Image (cartoon, rainbow, N blue to C red):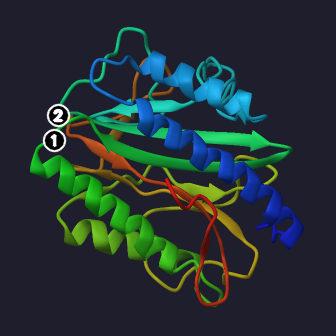
Amino acid sequence: MIHIKSEREIARIRESCRLTVETFQKVEQVICAGMTTFELDHIIEAHIREHGGRPAFKGYKIGKNVSPFPASSCISVEGEVVHGIPSKHRKLRNGEIVSIDVGIEYEGFFGDAAKTYAIGQVEERRARLMRITQEALHRGIARAIVGSRLSDISHAIQVHVESAGFSVVRDLVGHGVGRKLHEDPQIPNYGSPNRGPRLKEGMVFAIEPMVNAGAADVKTTADGWTVITKDGQPSAHFEHTVVVRDGEAEILTKGL
């Protein structure tokens, strides 16, 4: 069931998203070549906790056979699509792209966002992958309005990505967000238009295209979390938390 939030609830989610945006702004002050992903995660966690939030990913569980996620952010480098585990042994290098995903609980409500960064100067193909993925996110957001159907978001993302010669990951989806980090509905990044539930004012979604430079196929590594491209090609990930509105969606994580 898709929960329609009251304006009071949306105001609380907005506060969590404000802290999420501020956390990304902190990332942009420090991210550089030579930094380990562990160091970056430590800075992210410190910023969240210093401002009264809780890193929503830390300790997150997906099943009995996989250890809870051990870090405060997902940091996925190059061919890692999502859920990369920060490591003391992984230094960022010039020419790489790195996707950072942060979820925050603040006073009982969640915000969720992701952004892919270029480390130093990256080759044109990687830069274009990032640009197309970000554009696809905004094409999807443009359809998150009263009167659309859920698959209109998915279709807009898929068309933009595939017309650029890239692939949308099909095994991972966006989602509702609010009192829980992951709520109904699931929001695929592909699909035919004009299907699924009609969107209503006050629905809150985390829309998050994950786009591969090569094929769409992905697999999960032995750590049980890190999702990588099967062909080793780079991947990009952008995400905003948005409210369905009449006329134009409201981006609660605007300013990443």
What label sits on residue 143 in the rendered view?
none
* Comes first in the chain, label 2 or label 1: 2
In the displayed structure, 33 sits above or below 164; it is above
Camera-nearest residue between 20 and 223: 20
Answer with left or right where residue 154 lies relative to residue 108: left
Q: Nearer the viewer, residue 204 or 48?
A: 48
Residue farthest top in this picture: 89
Residue 72 in percent (x, y) is at 60, 27
Q: What secondary structure is found at the residue carrying circle 2? A: loop
Instruction: Give the residue furthest to the front.
Output: 29
The N terminus - image quarter: bottom right
Identify the secondary structure beneath mark 1: loop
Number of disc labels: 2
Horizontal side of residue 209 vs 57, given as left or right: left
- Residue on which disc 1 sits: 122
Q: Position of residue 114 (x, y in %)?
A: 49, 47
Distance in Å between CA atoms under marks 2 and 1 = 4 Å
The answer to whether marks 2 and 1 mark residues whose Cβ atoms lie closer than 8 Å is yes
| Mark drawn on residue 95 | 2
Q: Does residue 212 appear anywhere in the picture?
A: yes
Residue in the image at 34% along x and 15% along y = 90
On screen, residue 202 versus residue 120, left or right, reads right
Q: Position of residue 29 (x, y in %)?
A: 43, 35
Is residue 229 visible in the rendered structure shown here? no
Where on the picture, by quarter, is residue 135? bottom left
Q: Nearer the viewer, residue 205 or 123?
A: 123
Q: Callout 2: few (<14), some (14-19), or many (20+) C-alpha neighbours within 10 Å? A: some
